[in-house]
Image (spheres, rainbow, N blue to C red):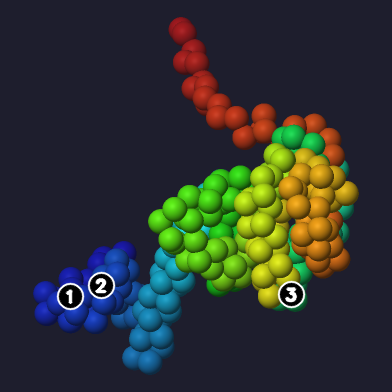
Amino acid sequence: MTTETISPDLKTILRRLRLGRLLDTLPERLVLARQQKLPHQDWLLLILSDEVTRRDSLAVTLRVQKAHLDATMHLEAWDPTANVTFDRALLNELTSLRFLDSHAHVAIVGPVGVGKTFLAHALGHIACRRGASVLAGRTDQMLKTLKHARLDHSYEAELRKLIAVDLLILDDFAIDTLDVTESRDLYEILLERYRAGSIVVTSNRGPDEWLATFADPIRAQSAIDRFTSNAYDLVIDGESYRPRLKPRVTKEPKERTR
């Protein structure tokens, strides 16, 4: 297909209008319009649709980066042959994001390595594609950030970041015993997001074991009860999924010797 030459004046105008990326496909679109004798209105719709698609794709990419999601952990990359068991009907329901619309929570529970973080991040990717704001991280790191924020008086701003997003992913939840400050912070997060925003937690411990990790049992009981009463439980069991994520060298076929 012969491409069209775009005049310098048109390039300047498109860039001033912040439509410079149209130049990537504009020559081919001009040829297509001439070959198919597209009406001007249809051709304009075509090139503007290209720009909308590009901007939507860029917006998703930026949301994923801001969310700190692992770029490799999206549902399309999940290995269905993994020797793990879980309620697949429930996972299908979760991927619809109806839990996000109703401000419900998700607890993904199971032993080490079965893919809990993978599925949590996969839900985060789906949410980003739907236009939701997401933030993901290890629970201990988030609590450490809040503790340090008290020193420079940025605590309220850091707490708002965790409360304001549509979906908060807390990985490795209730792994370590919490001190008084960490317990209070986690209590605030769970309390503020109750019926106001969704949380996905991954944990090696079941919800019945979470209470023992808090320093303040009264606050813990209140926060955990709010969470579990409004949460879906996705329990995973089986062999470790991590070997499937291990990088491998693709062997080149050997040349035949004559």
177 and 244: which is toward the camera: 177
For image coordinates 61% across by 45% down, the residue present is 140
Q: Residues within 10 Å of mark 1 (few under 14, many from 20)?
A: some
Q: Residues within 10 Å of mark 2 (few under 14, many from 20)?
A: some
Residue at 46 percent of width and 71 percent of height: 56
Calculate the distance from the C-alpha at mark 3 to the C-alpha at mark 1: 50 Å
The residue that mark 1 highlights is 11
**Up/down of 243 relative to 52, above or below:** above
Label 3 element class: loop
Disc 1 vs disc 2: Cβ atoms closer than 8 Å?
yes
Q: Which residue is labeled 2 in the image?
A: 20
Q: What SS does tag 2 mark?
A: helix
For marks 3 and 1 on the same chain, the one whose residue lies earlier in the sequence? 1
Q: Residue drawn 70% across and 60% down?
A: 187
Residue named by callout 3 = 195
Residue 207 spot, x, y in % from top left: 84, 51
Who is closer to the viewer here, 135 or 38? 135
Q: Is residue 93 above or below residue 139?
A: below
Q: Amino acid at mark 2?
A: Gly
